[in-house]
Image (cartoon, helix red, strand yellow):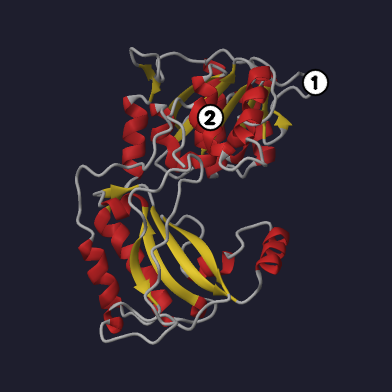
Amino acid sequence: MSAGVDSVNHAGVTVASPEVLGFMAAKRTPRARATRKVEAVAHRLIAGGPPLDRARSLWVCGSHARGAPDVGDVDLLLEIDEPRDRAQQAVDACYRRAHPYAEVVKALGCSGGSIVTVAVTPVFQPAPSLISPERAKSGVPPGHEVPRQPLLEHTVTGDPLDPQPKLLWVRGDSINEVRSRLVAIAEDPDARRFERTTTVPLIDTLLPLLGVQAGFRLAAQMRAGNFGVNALVLGEVPPPPEAEASLQLRYQLGSVRYVAAAATLDHLKRDGVPLGTVQLAGGRMTDPACEPQVEVSFNAFLLYLLASRPSHDGWRHLHVWPTRRGGRWLALDVIVKNGEAVWKLARRLDGDPDQPNSQCQAIRAALGMPPMQT
């Protein structure tokens, strides 16, 4: 692994280099632009066409709810009427395999590369239609109450989210009522970006890209000494001559993935890695007979798998986020130091399915957090 990519502080904790910090800062969105995106979502809800006619309430979470002046993304919680019973909804969601409410997310304009992330929560056997708080001041008939405040916990640590979701819209509200609630969330220049740290600064920096499940598992393996991890920014360069033909078979010449893969292979070659030991997208790069030692991937889910299954010592995984950023790509370089220990720790992190909160307690212990308060 090349030196000088990341710095390490005096306590031996891996932190992001200034170049990586600058790259991540450039990806953040000013609050004003993020707020306009939220208003666009509210406009679609107010229009109320199917499938959004089942929407009940919209809440904002995360850094936007904390008043951060810029955000990595905007986290929204949408409650919808669910006419199916719980068992049927669960079966249907399993067979779909994708987002169980993908059509709702698409109708909100939040699919693909949107900075707005929507968690859809079904309300089973819904009560009569909700009314807005403004129209509830003069008295509300039974069954038409203002929605109850959702109480959300961190999906990994089990801690209550800080702050809890803030109400933006209830069925029947106008866009002006949405705007007044957005204005009421005061901007705070000192707002924290994350409601719970992984205790590994490098992973905290990359958490918006990694996702909490993969990020916390990677952090646990790093703290245990099972992984060596670096982040780096790759610049656009031609592919190594011996890999050019193989790249052209995989990707369209000049495409984002072609150019990002070329930069990655050039980096590995300069780092002393024989390209015959590299596999990309499941295939060997230059020598089909050579045993692979390095995996290059654009699929972030493979980072989660890397931290959750056995692998041999010395295995190297280089993940690249192939975004269009003027010929620059962020990459995470992971080397397995103790593959057997990775597997053992991953099993502990799975917890005991018969014990409540055992997964949360296991990850907290692995990250040096205090025990979960019950």
The answer to whether residue 254 is seen in the rendering is: no
Estimate the x, y position of residue 107 in percent, counting from the top left. 50, 71
Type of amino acid at the residue the image marks with label 2: Leu
Q: Measured along the vertical axis of the image, is residue 326 above or below residue 179?
A: above
Mark 2 is surrounded, within 10 Å at the Cα level, by few (under 14), some (14 to 19) or many (20 or more) other residues, namely: many
Residue at position x 69%, y 23% in the image: 311
Residue at the limit of the structure toward the front, as seen here:
374
Q: Which residue is mark 1?
A: 289
Residue 117: x %, y % from top left: 45, 56
**Quick one: SS at disc 1?**
loop
Answer few, some or many: residues within 10 Å of disc 1's Cα (few below 14, many 20 plus, some between 14 and 19): few
Q: Is residue 258 above or below residue 263?
A: below
In the picture, residue 31 is in which quadrant?
bottom left
Q: Name the residue type under label 1.
A: Ala
Q: Nearer the viewer, residue 17 or 184?
A: 184
Q: Nearer the viewer, mark 1 or mark 2?
A: 2
Q: Place residue 150 in its image quadrant.
A: bottom left
Q: Residue at position x 37%, y 30% from top? A: 20
Q: Which residue is mark 2?
A: 218
Q: CA distance from mark 1 to mark 2?
A: 31 Å
Residue 250: percent from left, percent from top: 67, 40
Left or right: residue 288 versus residue 52 is right
Report the residue at 54% width, 40% height from top. 213
Label pair 1/2, CB-CB below 8 angstroms: no
Q: Secondary structure at mark 2?
A: helix
